[in-house]
Amino acid sequence: MRERTDLPAHQFEDVDQQHEASRLGMWIFLATEILFFGGMFTGYALYRSLYPAAFADASRTLEIVLGATNTMVLIGSSLTMAMAVHAAQVGRRKALTGFLLATIGLGLAFLAIKGIEYAHKFEHHLVPGSAFIYTDRFGPQAQLFFSFYFVMTGMHALHMVIGVCLLAALVAKSLRNRFSSAYYTPVELIGLYWHFVDIIWIFLFPLLYLIDRH
Amino acid sequence: MPELPLFPPQASTYAAREDALFFFLLLVSAFFAALIFFLVIFFAVRYRRRSPTERARVIREPLALELAWTLIPLGINVIAFVWGAQLFFFAARPPAASIEIAVVGKQWMWKFQHPEGRSEINELHVPEGRPIKLTMTSQDAIHSLFVPAFRIKKDAVPGRYTVAWFEATRTGDYHLFCTQYCGALHAHMIGRVTVMNPVAYQQWLGGPAVPAVPMAEAGRLLFQQRGCITCHRPDGKGLGPSLLGVFGQPVHLQDGRIVKADESYIRESVLLPQAKIVAGYPPVMPSFKGQIGEEGLLQIIAYIKSLKREEKGEAKP
Amino acid sequence: MNVPPLQQRAHYLNIDYRIRSWLFTTDHKRIAWLYLASITTLFFVGAAFAVAIRLNLLTPQGDLIQAETYNKMFTMHGLIMIFFFLIPSIPAVLGNFLIPMMIGARDVAFPRLNLASWYIFTLGALFTVTAAAVGGVDTGWTFYTPYSTTYSMTNVVLTVIGIFVVGFSSILTGLNFMVTIHKMRAPGLTWFRLPLFIWSLYASSVIFVLGTPVLAISLVLVAVERLFRIGIFDPALGGDPLLFQHLFWFYSHPAVYVMILPGMGVVSELIPCFSKKRIFGYHYVAFSSLAIAVIGFFVWGHHMFVSGQSVYAGMAFSALSFLVAVPSAIKVFNWTATLYKGSISHETPMLYALGFIGLFTIGGLTGLFLATMGVDIHVHDTYFVIAHFHYIMVGGAVMAYLGGIHFWWPKITGRMYPEAWARLAALIVFVGFNLTFFPQFILGYLGMPRRYHMYPPEFQALNVLSTAGASILGVGYVLPLIYLIWSLRYGAIADANPWDATGLEWQTPSPPPTENFEHPPVVTEEPYAYPTWEGEDA
């Protein structure tokens, strides 16, 4: 481990090169994430165009109030994340810790609300599998909607969980005074990741919840 | 001395066309492969290093040369593409006057039903000189029907119908393979296509002793047994729409869409009736999933195909 | 260059001998060794399955192995060779070793991530090998649905997890290489002064980064459908089996280019070095790599001409497949033109490079038959396809890999390999390869389907020929294993630049010090600037 954070790692010439390399690496990683979710969006789009009626019908069972609340929660968390990055840039360590904690709180709130929604789906037998019960009319096609609902929101929630863990690690580092206005690369990178996860939700919400409610 | 065949028999109209294109590609490939091999070996020998201090000569890199070996392969590729696509369209469009044979692939056998009712397993008898259209599906995994002597191949995909056709030109027995890996006994899904002269084929259709029920007739029986007839009355006064003359026609749905009543549509309507409701009718039809198998579905489709609008007056389905 | 003898000088191999100095290393050169050890092991495991397959096919009845076992064997052969050998071989071994040195850097951009990639790779391999050990998997490496999700009774989920995990290793390696090439080049090393090996690995990295995630999500969906009986691909549950094929080939066709592009990069280094002249048409060779990587993303549907996809979609995929053939042709012509009026010596790496040109030409040309829709109907899923892609993968990628290993062996180890043995092995590989796979073109056109455990008796003669060739090929692969290990101890000491090659990696001692260069290099000229002779022909 390096002692001083204002020195570049041995393979770099200077801190700027290191910072740029890290940022490019994060952007490339986010590109892979787009393709990862892209596969699911493609499948979703295909089946929705094949079975529009069933998808609209199944979409109506989703709880729009909880979904909308979660959208607000996530947008809020993006705001606190952006403020955390700004606090890091100007070297305000207490503010940095505070905003990171706020982001974690909002992230956890999102996961909790998502958990409530999942629980309701279980109660109403809307989880695909042998216990799945739905009106005869759209049986397997509606089940497809729920398959994609769970896979896509599940993958998104997994990214949220990873994000919260990364933020917790940032808080720990921040408390140990590891960041300064000269060195805040991890905050910036995890901020990028957090915004990306938010944007995925901004696409998921209308695609899943708002099909038939225009 | 074991057999050493180097070329498959050519026994369909498509095979002759395909072989022509194949030999064109073979010729082009042989030419370029020979050219590259010759140049590589010739240069490697001619310009071998003769002393440790030898130096390579500076050569020009003319743009014309780069353009030539970009554009010439491109041009040849355009020819191959157009020719290949034409051939593919030929293979994808069965002639109207084809004999329609229904094919179901299952682990691990091929089942064929002739329109006259005779069905066979892993064997297919066809007449010479008549186009044969195969309407295929699968009961489980994806299979693929392949007759090397005819150069035709098509996947049999569960849940949908695919079509292949051929016109055999030479009597004889030919291999029939499954080429889409489908499980333990994939390699046992080998069958035989027997091409017969038309007279022998008619005799074959007449045998064996047990009289066969034509496909459309079998479908009619199923239509009655399952009670479809109570709602889908020919006079259109039942709970469901009349099916007279429906096949191949556009159908107006309740949600405003228009779909074509083809094999897949009929199949879906039997298995998942609520998916596409015809405009003006209540969504009351129960699903027949699990009650009618792939072969039964093909029979019902054959029956619905056979219902012509002209018969409306005296139809007695 | 005045360098002290091997034993007295500190270099990356002798600075520390403890096992943990290897397992926790962040030195890209040592990580290359870790990969070399893993993939060599996996190569011979995969090859063992191939031996069993070829032996079984000696007789039409397939007497040696039961059908179920045979199906598991060709599946494991495909999975191991593709995901654990061909895809990582050149990038993870030679790429890891060479990229930082070729661009004058001390290491890759993210050394710890680089080590993590190797652990992830190993973890994925463990999953897959475990799946094989506890009952196997029989879906074929393509995992086609609904067979893989519904009908197979084998360890699909465990295997899929293994492939999913190893995919992350590819993604992280690709990411690391891209950032390294973008941000860590030595002063003066502009993009058009980069060796072509770097260009080809850059193109491969793009595919790693953009393609692998799609494979990952497809495999997740397969596992989810299989575990929870959720309908995604199985039509019995409302799904569409062709969607899986689209998603799968969206990755797996570009993945084919990931296997061959690095090989093209190696050959683009070997040919100028052993012809002692600049490569012909540097820019065309460089850009053709990128063209292949980009167009390669839009040709996946040519695997599906007979699957029931629409004929118009088929036409588009066919046209694009013909288009992607052109950059490959450009490369072959430029390599050939490089030989013209060169000063050609025939050391082992050059033999492999020349063999590569020939075999890749055959592999590429037979690809045209498959891109031609009307002909593909007949040859699809037959041994013609098997022969075609083995000409590209084994005739191309493996030949290039072996050529590259021999070429950079002195740099990697500080020792020379035994030249006579190596030439003999190269010859055996070339002969054995052609004898194994050329008969399979004929078998395929005759109609022998792939993945068949038994076959009609008239195909036997060609199958026997192919098996005979495979045993020769096997000898050709074991020989280098033996003499390369031997050379580690007994090989002649190599100096810094035994081939008189250009390139930054040859300007540092063999083996290099941990940080690659004693003085950071500065680049002032084009690549492949071999001293030439202007004047009349001799």
Image (cartoon, rainbow, N blue to C red):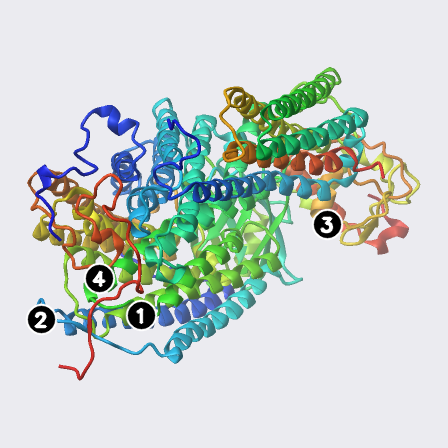
Read off the chain for label 4.
C
Whole-angstrom CA distance, mark 1 to mark 2, is 22 Å
Residue B308: percent from the left, percent from the top? 81, 53
The numbered dot on residue C478 is: none
Pair 2/3: label in front = 2
Whole-angstrom CA distance, mark 1 to mark 3, is 57 Å
Label 3: which secondary element: loop
Q: Are marks 1 and 3 on the same chain?
A: no
Mark 1 highlights which residue?
C280
Whole-angstrom CA distance, mark 4 to mark 2, is 16 Å
| Res C465 seen here | no
Determine the residue positioned at 73% across, 27% down.
Answer: A73
Mark 3 highlights which residue?
B262
Amino acid beneath label 2:
Arg
Labels 4 and 3 touching (C-beta < 8 A): no
Labels 2 and 3 touching (C-beta < 8 A): no
Read off the chain for label 1.
C
Q: Residues within 10 Å of mark 2 (few under 14, many from 20)?
A: few
Amino acid beneath label 4:
Cys
Read off the chain for label 2.
B
Mark 4 highlights which residue?
C273
Whole-angstrom CA distance, mark 4 to mark 3, is 63 Å
The answer to whether residue C92 is above or below residue B52 is above
